[in-house]
Image (cartoon, rainbow, N blue to C red):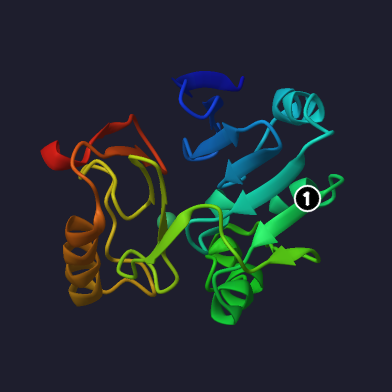
């Protein structure tokens, strides 16, 4: 079930979350007047597609925090919806999404090759490249909200031992985020509950 988390009265937007039964991936949805931003289309059940259908008059824009397949399991199905675009941060990112070894789906015998036809290169969210958990990890910022993917995440879920992980890169990414984020930022991570960045 897609559940509302926050409302922003200033710009009339609502933020929703769906928690997948596959690895507990959190997908987020920012509903604005003229568009729906979808962050990490993991494994969705029918209720999510029914919910998405309610907004088929809006433009959908899909963001993916990193290449690991659990964060874009159903992306191809979402790309098939009308008026849907994928924000592509780089060509390397797009290649990693369809590489079943880089996205790790090969190792789970569940090959996922995510390919978007309609791409967008300009972003509605602030995009910060944050390698470390994986080579192609990104964080996205919306107002005072940080979509942390598997990068800024409760430490009990933090993994830096996968193929493509790099501890030095991770430290640099964390320092970069500390420089760039406003005070009182709230983190919406790829797994688990949201929390204050400063208390992390
Ligand atoms: Zn991951």
How many marks can you see?
A: 1
Choose between 153 and 118: the one closer to the eye: 118
Which quadrant of the structure image shows residue 32?
top right
Quarter of the image with the N terminus is top right
- Indicate the position of residue 196 as horizontal and vertical percent values: 21, 34
- Horizontal side, residue 24 vs residue 48: left or right: left
Quarter of the image with the C terminus is top left
Which residue bears the numbered disc 1?
84
Q: Residues within 10 Å of mark 1 (few under 14, many from 20)?
A: many
Residue at the (22%, 66%) spot, across then down = 176
Q: Is residue 22 above or below residue 115?
A: above
- Indicate the position of residue 45 as horizontal and vertical percent values: 70, 30
Choose between 96 and 121: the one closer to the eye: 121
Residue at the (37%, 52%) spot, across then down = 150
Which quadrant of the structure image shows residue 133?
bottom left
- Horizontal side, residue 78 vs residue 155: left or right: right
Q: Is residue 2 above or below residue 90?
A: above
Q: Is residue 148 above or below residue 24?
A: below
| Residue that sits furthest to the left in the current view | 199
Q: Ligand 1 is in which quadrant of the figure?
A: bottom left
- Indicate the position of residue 58 as horizontal and vertical percent values: 78, 37
**Is the C-beta of the residue carrying label 1 under 8 Å from the nearest atom of ligand 1?**
no
- Horizontal side, residue 134 vs residue 56: left or right: left
Which quadrant of the structure image shows residue 165?
bottom left
The answer to whether residue 76 is seen in the rendering is: no
| Residue that sits furthest to the front in the current view | 10
> Which structural element holds mark 1?
strand
The answer to whether residue 105 is seen in the rendering is: yes
- Horizontal side, residue 101 vs residue 85: left or right: left
Residue at the (67%, 35%) spot, across then down = 44
């Amino acid at each position: 079930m897609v559940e509302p988390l926050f409302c922003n009265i200033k710009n009339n937007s609502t933020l929703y979350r769906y928690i997948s039964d596959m690895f507990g991936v959190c997908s987020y949805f920012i509903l604005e007047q003229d568009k729906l931003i979808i962050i990490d289309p993991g494994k969705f059940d029918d209720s999510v597609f029914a919910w998405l259908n309610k907004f088929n008059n809006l433009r959908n824009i899909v963001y993916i925090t990193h290449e690991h397949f659990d964060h874009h399991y159903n992306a191809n199905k979402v790309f098939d919806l009308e008026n849907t675009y994928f924000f592509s941060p780089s060509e390397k990112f797009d290649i990693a999404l369809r590489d079943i070894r880089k996205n790790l789906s090969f190792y789970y015998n569940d090959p996922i090759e995510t390919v978007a036809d309609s791409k967008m290169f300009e972003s509605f969210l602030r995009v910060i490249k944050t390698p470390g958990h994986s080579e192609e990890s990104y964080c996205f910022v919306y107002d005072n909200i940080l979509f942390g993917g598997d990068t800024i995440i409760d430490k009990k879920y933090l993994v830096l031992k996968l193929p493509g992980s790099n501890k030095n890169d991770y430290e640099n990414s964390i320092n970069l985020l500390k420089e760039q984020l406003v005070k009182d930022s709230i983190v919406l991570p790829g797994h688990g509950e949201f929390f204050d960045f400063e208390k992390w």
